[in-house]
Image (spheres, rainbow, N blue to C red):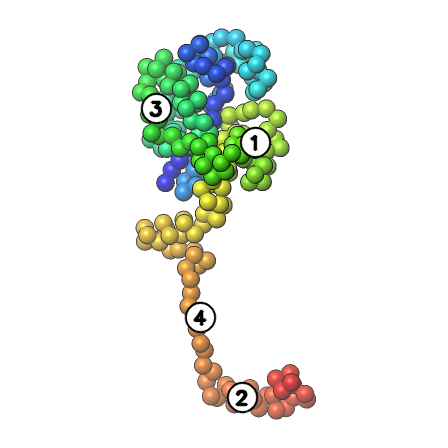
Amino acid sequence: MREIVMDTETTGLDPGAGHRIVEIGAIELVHHVPTGRHYHQYINPERTMPDDAFRVHGLGSDFLKDFPVFAAVVDDFLAFIADSPLVIHNASFDLNFLNAELKQARRPLLPNARAIDTLPMAQRKFPGAPANLDALCRRFNVDGSARKLHGALLDSELLAEVYLHLKGGRQVDLGLAVQTASRGGPAPVAAVPRPHRRFTVPPAELEAHQAFIAGLKDPVWHR
């Protein structure tokens, strides 16, 4: 099963007010395991960066002005995510921005049903507790020390680890073994329980062992 964990950074909170996406980060999971494949793109928003947004992610207008606009990278982005489910923290925020950009680029919109939203997952698992990404990293001992500012690719990597914990923990190898076996492939030894066996020593070997013991001084077998 392929999933895409992703995040965006923007110029503000509302695409309806003219705010745009400035960064997209996405990583590929197969059976909940990162494959190493990822998509990362800075985007020229074709507008100035408000101070409030700059303080969140540190991406200024001077830095972004030489990157491509969304319409120039949209097809590469859509090719990477393909038809896979999208794992997003607070999915409605990112989908609103992505769909605003896709509409402007005259591309099909992303349905809400494609999103696996880790925010309500965390809220259900830990009712009343903080459920932002920093809090979840602390709860699950995920190393978020590199997260001085928000960044779409780094946040996607952290979210992938948090998502795995929310799904039930990091021990995914047994699940992979079952899926591999169901396709007819070999399953790892650790995933296949083995029955206890009794071994019978042949009489000739037992006699030889007893003769060997008889020739020893104070053998441990007699203690």
- Quickly name the residue at label 1: 134
- Quickly name the residue at label 3: 110
Q: Dividing the picture into quarters, in which one does residue 149 lie?
A: top right
Q: Which mark is residue 208?
A: 2
Q: Secondary structure at mark 1?
A: helix
Q: Quadrant of the C terminus?
A: bottom right
> Which of marks 4 and 2 precedes in the sequence?
4
Q: Nearer the viewer, mark 3 or mark 2?
A: 3
On screen, residue 99 versus residue 49, left or right, reads left
Q: Secondary structure at mark 2?
A: helix
Residue 68 seen in this snapshot: no
Q: Which mark is residue 91?
A: none
Mark 3, other Cα within 10 Å: few <14 / some 14–19 / many ≥20: some
> Which of marks 1 and 4 precedes in the sequence?
1
Residue 48 point in image, percent of width and height: 52, 8
* Residue at 52% from the left image edge and 90% from the top image edge: 207
> Which of marks 3 and 1 precedes in the sequence?
3
Considering only vertical position in the picture, is 6 above or below 204? above
Residue extending farthest to the right is 217
- Quickly name the residue at label 4: 196
Residue type at tag 2? Ala
